[in-house]
Image: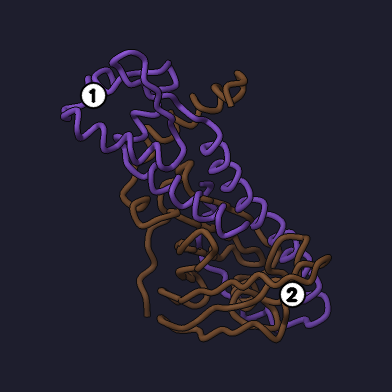
Chain colours: A purple, B brown
Amino acid sequence: MSTLEADRLSTVFAALADPTRRAILARLTTGDATVTELAEPFAMSQPAVSKHLRVLESAGLISRSRVATSRYSHLEAEPLKEANDWMQTYRRFWNESFDKLDAALADYLATERPNTDDTQHRDEKETEK
Amino acid sequence: MSAIPEIPTAEDTDVFITRAFDAPRDVVWKFFTEPALLATWFGPSSVHVDPASVEIDLRVGGVWNLDMVDNETGEHYPVRSELTAVVAPEYLEGQVVSPAGVVTLRIWLHDHGDKTRLTLHQGPFSAEFRDMTSDGWLESFLKIDAEIAGGVA
């Protein structure tokens, strides 16, 4: 990952860290909306909503366009997809690492034969997460 | 000695992996905390660890560092971490520095005799994420997934 991509992802994650901004994005999945429309469900002034919109816009999560006197916000899905992909990358990172750990443990136990007789057997119930 | 936190509830924002290993807990612990053993497995299949790069100072405030090396290009990917909790042989926690920022990595090892169950939690992906609840987030993601599937992106 380049520094530029990483910086952009950090901006996306920071923008998504706020519940109001996530709610705004969820609202925008149903269609473009004006600041007034977006402010409606929140006990929040229009300037406060505008501030959130600026954060979302600078993260590339929304774009805004003017139609006559109204300014519409539009959801940009691509950065979210990137953020999701990025998390998938982490999962793959660990799953592949653990495949290697599995093999390394098998090798270790087969060759080193450590003294496992004193392994503690705790009375611990196997719990499924 | 550090306190072991409860395993947090899985959230879509964080990486959460549970896996069973066919080895006693003390052995699995060694593979996370002894440099020569950690070097044998860490990283995805496309990389290996430079054994000389592994530096582990097993205490709170100590380092847990290594370099991953791309098998094809030889490019080095440093992993730099500071340990924030060490409870041998059951819990390891650190702040991992990656290109995307600092993330908390937590590893629980559960003793099941000859087997060990490992729970890994990585995240949140920024300090603000810590206070984040799962509601809204997951919903947004599902909707946006549908949006992407619908060809909007």
Residue at the extreme top of the image, as rendered: A68
For the point 30% across and 17% down, the residue is A70
The picture places residue B78, in percent across and down from the top left corner, at 62, 73
Q: Residue at x 57, y 78 (%)?
A: B65
Residue A87 in the image, given as x and y percentages of width and height: 56, 47
Report the residue that reaches farthest toward the front.
Answer: A68
Q: What quarter of the picture does the N terminus of chain A occupy? A: bottom right
Give the residue displayed 52% in from the left and 67% down from the top: A122
Residue at (40% x, 18% y) in the render? A32
Say if A23 sits above or below B16 in the image.
Answer: above
Location of residue A104 in the rendering, given as x and y in whole percent from the top left corner: 76, 70
Check the residue under mark 1 and report the chain it is in.
A
Q: Could you say which disc has been placed on residue A39 in the image?
A: 1
Residue A105 shows in this picture: no
Which one is nearer the viewer's eye here, A32 or B121? A32
Labels 1 and 2 positioned on one and the same chain: no
Q: Nearer the viewer, residue A46 or A85?
A: A46
Q: Secondary structure at mark 1?
A: helix
Q: Which mark is residue A129?
A: none
Q: Is residue B89 above or below residue A95?
A: below
Q: Quadrant of residue A109?
A: bottom right
Instruction: Please name whichever residue, A90 or A69, is drawn nearer the observer in this view of the structure.
Output: A69
Is residue B30 something that shows in the picture? yes
Q: Amino acid at mark 1?
A: Ala
Q: Which residue is mark 2?
A: B40
Q: Nearer the viewer, residue B150 or B35?
A: B150
Where does residue B132 sit, x and y in percent of width and height? 34, 45
Secondary element type, mark 2: loop
Give the amino acid type for the residue marked by disc 2 in the picture: Thr
Q: Is residue A89 above or below residue A66?
A: below
Q: Is residue B33 left or right of residue A27?
A: right
Identify the chain of the residue marked 2, using the numbered disc in the image. Answer: B
